[in-house]
């Protein structure tokens, strides 16, 4: 090489070899960082049909998670419409301290852990169609499973509400609400919205909204992982009646993600 001439840069092959030698020198302790998709898969328990990540998210992270999902699936919405669907972290009750798996078997324990008086879960307001607890699921089949999981709160005078479309006509659901006391009710976002708009599902006695967020199907999808369920859920949770009460100290409404 002529004097004063700049040295040629190392070839790509030589750089790769030097990196390999560095890994060998430290005993191979350097590990490739997992991609976001790989990390998501680690959070999924397919045998239990659970996304374990949801249980670890605090209020701030859940609010961010909802905003991300809403923008992912709401590409046909205007920015002002998307912002109207955002949920404040202050509106979400932090339930990350609940250490049991978010399975159906543990759902009653979760509800009781966040109730001032667990015995009141088996009670109901005197006015028909006025539940104190609404559990929101992504599909009718799942909703039917959730109903069975909370049947302990049902009695001769008080019925767990089935507010979903699986083999149940909306007119039949309206008649049920008009004629039955229900403390705990389970429904899907679209049907719940329709029942509120009809005036048969009353919200003035509502104390808690519970989102069935950890459950996933065989395709690894939960209620917040599909456009057909996430956008209706966002619209349901951001109803004006709810947003007014999420942070209201006098008439608080708990928003919980199970």
Image: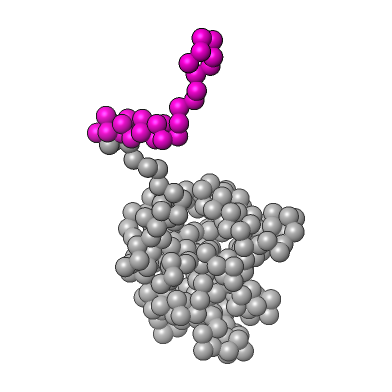
Span of residues in magenta: 1-27
Left-right relation of 28 to 127: left
Q: Nearer the viewer, residue 199 or 53?
A: 53
Whole-percent x, y for residue 27 in the image = 24, 33
Whole-percent x, y for residue 130 in the image = 57, 74
Could you tell me if residue 242 is visible in this image? no
Left-right relation of 151 to 129: left
Query: What residue sits 41% from the left and 60% below the top?
Result: 51
Query: What residue sits 55% from the left and 74% below the top?
Result: 188
Whole-percent x, y for residue 149 in the image = 37, 74
> Above or below — where is 172 with respect to 82?
below
Q: Quadrant of the C terminus?
A: bottom left
Whole-percent x, y for residue 218 in the image = 41, 72
> Above or below — where is 214 with respect to 156?
above
Q: Across the whole image, how many numbered discs are drawn on residues?
A: 0
> Above or below — where is 54 with respect to 15?
below
Query: What residue sits 75% from the left and 59% below the top?
Result: 78
Q: Nearer the viewer, residue 224 or 103?
A: 224
């Amino acid at each position: 090489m002529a004097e004063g001439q700049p040295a040629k840069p190392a070839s790509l092959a030589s750089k790769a070899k030097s990196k390999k030698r560095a890994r060998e020198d430290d005993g191979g302790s350097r590990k490739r960082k997992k991609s976001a998709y790989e990390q998501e898969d680690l959070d999924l328990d397919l045998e239990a049909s659970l996304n374990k990540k949801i249980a670890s998210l605090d209020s701030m992270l859940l609010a961010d998670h909802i905003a991300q999902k809403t923008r992912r699936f709401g590409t046909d919405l205007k920015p002002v419409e998307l912002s109207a669907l955002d949920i404040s972290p202050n509106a979400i009750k932090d339930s990350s301290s609940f250490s049991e798996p978010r399975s159906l078997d543990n759902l009653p324990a979760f509800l009781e852990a966040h109730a001032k008086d667990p015995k009141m879960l088996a009670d109901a307001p005197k006015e028909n169609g006025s539940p104190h607890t609404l559990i929101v699921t992504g599909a009718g089949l799942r909703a039917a499973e959730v109903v069975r999981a909370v049947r302990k709160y049902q009695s001769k005078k008080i019925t767990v509400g089935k507010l979903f479309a699986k083999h149940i006509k909306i007119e039949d659901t309206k008649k049920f609400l008009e004629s039955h006391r229900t403390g705990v009710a389970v429904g899907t976002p679209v049907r719940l919205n329709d029942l509120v708009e009809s005036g048969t599902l009353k919200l003035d006695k509502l104390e808690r909204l519970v989102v069935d967020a950890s459950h996933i199907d065989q395709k690894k999808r939960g209620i917040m992982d599909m456009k057909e369920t996430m956008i209706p859920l966002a619209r349901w949770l951001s109803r004006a009646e709810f947003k007014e009460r999420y942070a209201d100290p006098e008439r608080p409404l708990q928003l919980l993600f199970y």
